[in-house]
Image (cartoon, rainbow, N blue to C red):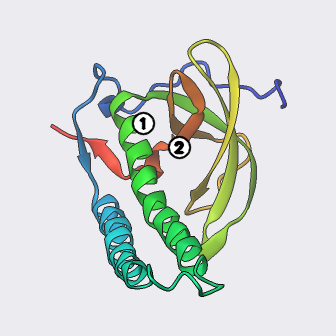
Amino acid sequence: MDSKVPFPEHWTAPPELAGPLPRTIRIRKDGIALIAVGTATLFGFGWKFVSELRQDVHRTADPFWWIPCILLAFLTALGLWPLMLVRLHRRLVSGGFPAAAVVVGCRPGGRGGWRAKYQFRTENGIVVEGDGVIGQSPAIGSTLCVVYLPKSPQRNQLYSNLMYHVGR
């Protein structure tokens, strides 16, 4: 990790992040959509396969009885992933600390965006690396706002990408 990155000295966090913790937050529309997709995946696919497994209980002579179980486990993980991502974003906005992140690398990402690699310094002075998708290519050395969990700074996200915002 390059410890010679010049961190901004007089950076101030967005005003909505300067309030006391825990913050009052509201979910954005993309967060609601992700919750709907995750819930539908869990209940839709899960219900279908559980009902089929109940019918197949008496067919234990079938040598491939385990395939639906593996498929159910995969679809459960697929449904839980967006729900866990939304939960992390909720924790970051309600109780995370803002920090100035310096862009140390950038490469094209998926769907026309860019993946920015950044470093930031926590309140304890620890330098942490992270990366995130951003719409426009940031210049190396430019500053972005990240939010991180104080007890686990490796859990961080660009503030502009979070599915929650500070509410009133």
| x 60%, y 76%: residue | 66
Q: Residue furthest top?
A: 124
| x 57%, y 30%: residue | 100
Along the line of sight, which residue is nearer the eye, 103 or 50? 50
Cα–Cα span, label 2 and label 1 = 8 Å
Along the line of sight, which residue is nearer the eye, 131 or 63? 63
Residue matched to label 1? 92
Count of all numbered marks drawn on residues in the image: 2
Instruction: Give the left or right position of residue 51, taking residue 112 as reference.
Output: left
Is label 1 in a helix, a strand or a loop?
helix
Along the line of sight, which residue is nearer the eye, 101 or 40? 40
Q: Position of residue 54 (x, y in %)?
A: 37, 78
Label drawn at residue 19 = none
Is label 2 in a helix, a strand or a loop?
strand
Q: Position of residue 44 (x, y in %)?
A: 33, 77
Above-or-below relation of 88 to 42: above
Residue type at the position of mark 1: Leu
| x 60%, y 12%: residue | 124
Label drawn at residue 157 = 2
For marks 2 and 1 on the same chain, the one whose residue lies earlier in the sequence: 1
Q: Residues within 10 Å of mark 2 (few under 14, many from 20)?
A: many
